[in-house]
Image: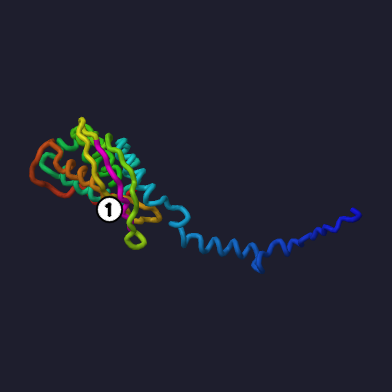
């Protein structure tokens, strides 16, 4: 067009395939090599969000979701408590009343499954204690870092238990495990462990051989 001084440059395929002197193919290869080095930065949920989701699942008694947020060490602790109950002289009663399962079924459960079944049984046998978690209101206040792989999330908890309001400031300690923040310590978990140990189905002394070798957590 006359008077139009705009120029249009057509880049060759070779030029289009190069950025800053580095071929696109090589950039793609570098991204492929270095991307796995930073999985946490790119994919992990924040410690605050993880703690909030964990506490919300706990309040709603969504045991599958709670288990998803737990560190494997915590699941192993619940597994150990359950094993002590089942190996107890009253183990058969524990299996029937708490787990509604046979020894063979219990032996085949992973630590995650043991936790889920334990909490469902607890909901039946210590319902008042478990339901007190449902009425808890939580507000995240902040996070205290400890190195690169540990975070302590501070939150305010308000519980209205039959008209009595109980308020406190607590923490959820999280550890980075396989690229995800997972809950390692929390007061509510300690309460559940204590309640599971004292489940009122029968007491006795351990007898017989160990029931199982620990099953890998799924």
Disc 1: which residue: 73
Residue 24: x and y in percent read 64, 62
Q: Vertically, is 211 above or below 130?
A: below
* Snapshot quadrant of residue 136: top left
Number of numbered labels in the structure image: 1
158 inside magenta stretch: yes
Q: How is the image coloured?
A: rainbow
Residue 43: x and y in percent read 46, 53
The residue drawn where x is 17% and y is 49% is 210
The residue drawn where x is 61% and y is 65% is 26
164 and 124: which is toward the camera: 164
Taking the view exactly as shown, the residue that stands out farthest to the top is 162
Residue 66: x and y in percent read 32, 42
* Snapshot quadrant of residue 32: bottom right
Taking the view exactly as shown, the residue that stands out farthest to the left is 204
106 and 203: which is toward the camera: 203
Q: Vertically, is 143 above or below 202?
A: below
Tag 1, which secondary structure? helix
Magenta residues, as a range? Answer: 150-159
Secondary structure that dominates the magenta span: strand
Label 1: how many Cα within 10 Å (few below 14, some 14–19, many 20+):
some
9 inside magenta stretch: no
Residue 17: x and y in percent read 69, 62
The residue drawn where x is 20% and y is 43% is 191
Taking the view exactly as shown, the residue that stands out farthest to the right is 2
Left or right placement of residue 15 versus residue 98 in this view: right
Q: Is residue 185 visible?
A: yes
């Amino acid at each position: 067009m006359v008077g139009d001084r705009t120029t249009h440059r057509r880049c060759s395929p070779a030029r289009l395939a190069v950025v800053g002197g580095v071929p696109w193919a090589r950039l793609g290869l570098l991204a492929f090599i270095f991307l796995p080095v930073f999985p946490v930065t790119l994919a992990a949920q924040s410690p605050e969000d993880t703690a909030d989701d964990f506490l919300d699942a706990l309040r709603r008694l969504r045991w599958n979701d709670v288990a998803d947020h737990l560190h494997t060490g915590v699941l192993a602790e619940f597994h150990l408590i359950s094993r002590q109950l089942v190996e107890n002289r009253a183990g058969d009663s524990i299996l029937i009343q708490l787990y509604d399962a046979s020894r063979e079924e219990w032996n085949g459960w992973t630590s995650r499954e043991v936790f889920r079944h334990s909490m469902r049984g607890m909901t039946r046998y210590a319902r008042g204690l478990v339901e007190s978690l449902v009425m808890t209101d939580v507000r995240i206040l902040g996070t205290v870092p400890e190195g690169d792989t540990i975070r302590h999330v501070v939150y305010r908890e308000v519980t209205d238990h039959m008209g009595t309001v109980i308020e406190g400031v607590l923490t959820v300690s999280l550890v980075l495990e396989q690229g995800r923040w997972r809950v390692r310590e929390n007061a509510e978990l300690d309460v559940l462990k204590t309640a599971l140990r004292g489940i009122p189905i029968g007491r006795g002394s351990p007898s017989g051989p160990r029931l199982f070798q620990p099953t890998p957590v799924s």
